Image: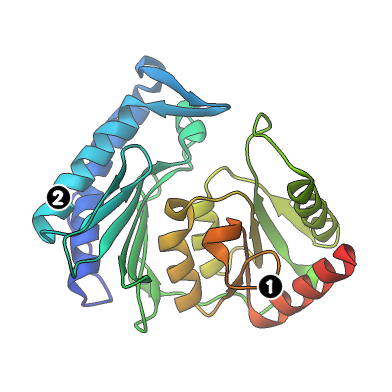
Amino acid sequence: MSEHLPRLSIQFPLVTMMARAALKAARKLVRDFGEVENLQVSRKGPGDFVTAADLRAEKILREELEKAKEGAGFLLEESGEVPAQPGMGRWIIDPLDGTTNFMHGVPHFAISMAYEERGQVIAGLIYNPITDEMYYAAKGMGAYLNDRRLRVSARERLPDCLMAASRPHAQAEGSKSFAAELHKVAVVSSQVAGLRRMGSATLDLCYLAAGRYDLYVGLDLSPWDMAAGLLIAREAGAVVTDIYGKDDIFQTRSIVVANERVHTTTMALMKKIAA
């Protein structure tokens, strides 16, 4: 990971604030990752672990961002919600997305931060300290990986596409509607060149923005899984809807993300399956 703040291609104060906070929190995460067998682990829910590393990273991020933007609120994966002062926005933070990977020594995890103002995410940053890849975007200013501008892939046919997907852990409770959603994902995945499920929704969205994946479908996601990554994907040219083709992403907790042609084809296939 970088020891110093990288040269950012977006001159936007919120992005700089997030980059500084991410680097500070990442130092602790990298040290903890090197001693993963010694981490204190507690059960947070079915198949979902929270570690001392999560909490340490979240504390650092909150402290740094509180100093940077006084009065802003927080939506934190581990600690819940802190209301904003009147007229202020809020930070949406996942201090360690890919906790299960982290706990098993798999170097595929990230810090994710977004800033939301009047219901719109206007800046986002996702950082994998192991690969030293920093993805970031500001609304209307494009998306970047380190100093490289990002653009979604130009593939047009599902059989040529590499798809990524995420879904809840096996122990999570399901419903009839959720079973139908899973069926849609399974049918779509049978039509593509390959399917990946890597355990970090935030990085899946970044890979989509970078053209590494051509299609991403996520189910049962929380705001901190999506907020920064969706802005980065959109600024890279992606079309984003929920699994029903609508904009009710945070209500349905589902997303379908791809370039315009692949997204249109995917939604047509899903509607056909539903019918």
- Residue found farthest to the front: 86
Name which residue lies at 37% across and 70% down: 119
Horizontal side of 114 relative to 188 (left or right) equals: left
Question: Is 208 rendered above or below residue 73?
Answer: below
Question: Is 57 rendered above or below residue 137?
Answer: above
Horizontal side of 188 relative to 259 (left or right) equals: right
How many numbered circles does the render carry?
2
Pick the quarter of the image with the C terminus: bottom right
Dot 2 alpha-carbon crowd within 10 angstroms: few under 14, some 14 to 19, many 20 or more: some
Check whether the beta carbons of the residues at disc 1 and disc 2 lie within 8 A of each other. Answer: no
Mark 1 vs mark 2: which is more N-terminal? 2
Q: CA distance from mark 1 to mark 2?
A: 37 Å
- The disc labelled 2 sits on which kind of residue? Glu
Q: Which residue is mark 2?
A: 64
Q: Callout 2: helix, strand or loop?
A: helix
30 or 142, which lies in front? 142
**Residue 102 visible within the image:** yes
Name which residue lies at 45% across and 32% down: 102
Rendered image: mark on residue 205: none
Q: Which residue is mark 1?
A: 245
- The disc labelled 1 sits on which kind of residue? Gly
Looking at the picture, the colour scheme in use is: rainbow
On the image, the x and y values in percent for residue 23 come to 23, 49
On the image, the x and y values in percent for residue 66 come to 14, 53
